[in-house]
Image: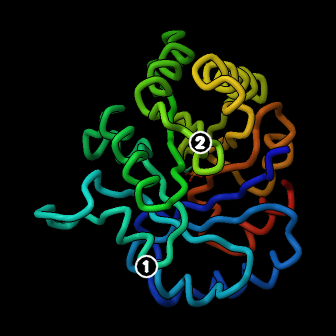
Amino acid sequence: MRRKLAAGNWKMNGGSAELAEIRELLKSSSTAQTDILICPPATLIERMRALVADAPLSIGGQDCHVAKSGAHTGDISAGMLADAGASHVIVGHSERRQDHGETDAIVRAKATASWGAGLIAVICIGETLDEREGGKTLDVIATQLDGSVPDEMAPETTVIAYEPVWAIGTGLTPTLEQIGEVHDFIRSELGKKFAERADGVRLLYGGSVKPSNAAEIFGVSNVDGALVGGASLKASDFSGIIAAL
Ligand code: PEP
């Protein structure tokens, strides 16, 4: 049985003042039956970790470098994230793929680096609007899965987030049928490659999830939770999504 996961990606948002949202979230989510993960900017990981103390709320990074250390100005390694108190890291978010030219091979190396540091990798995949409209969605998903998920994948340390690029931050969402089609496809592709290991991997949907659409999305087959951007910034919104899981 896969435990549901509500994961929030704060992106490049939030400073000390926004830690108040975590205090608020801790109050409203103390009885949640699901796993909760917040991925703040790296500058907040340590303080957020201290704030959540023993509460069942995990903290993650939003990206990591493939190397353990070295001359990579501005980058952060998976080991550094772990050292700061992170237990998870997002790799291959479409904003990294688009803005930083990250290929499937790089994302794969980042997932391996995450595991090497003892982190759970949240590996993101998803098609662009052109690819969706060109009928290429499942081909793109198959290619990204094959290229981005290392052969050593273990379900305990891997989460896959399906995030259609055109649904991120746009207010647009695929139909429930479209979400179900892709999630079922991901499960079956993983099954071909990883056999029974595929069953335990949690598959998150991401792209304009909000309290008002969360319940119907979570009702779709093979949706084990959500990766949430904008609506994870306010505790009131994110707790509404957690409650829908
Ligand atoms: C995201 O950035 O992963 C995301 C899903 O963003 P939003 O929820 O704002 O669409």
- Please provide percent x and percent y for residue 7: 64, 58
| Quadrant position of residue 117 | bottom left
Residue placed under numbered mark 1 in the picture: 84
| Circle number at residue 210 | none
CB at disc 2 and ligand 1 closer than 8 Å:
no
| Foreground label between 2 and 1 | 2
- Please provide percent x and percent y for residue 203: 68, 39
Give the position of the C terminus as an image quadrant. Answer: bottom right
Q: Secondary structure at mark 1?
A: helix
| Circle number at residue 154 | 2
- Does residue 223 appear left or right of residue 46 in this picture? right
- Does residue 40 appear left or right of residue 68 in this picture? right
Give the position of the N terminus as an image quadrant. Answer: top right
**Along the viewing direction, whichever of 202 and 113 lies nearer the viewer:** 113
Q: Residue at 34% x, 42% y: name it.
A: 109
Spatial separation of the CA atoms under disc 2 and disc 1:
24 Å
Q: As displayed, is residue 98 above or below residue 12?
A: above
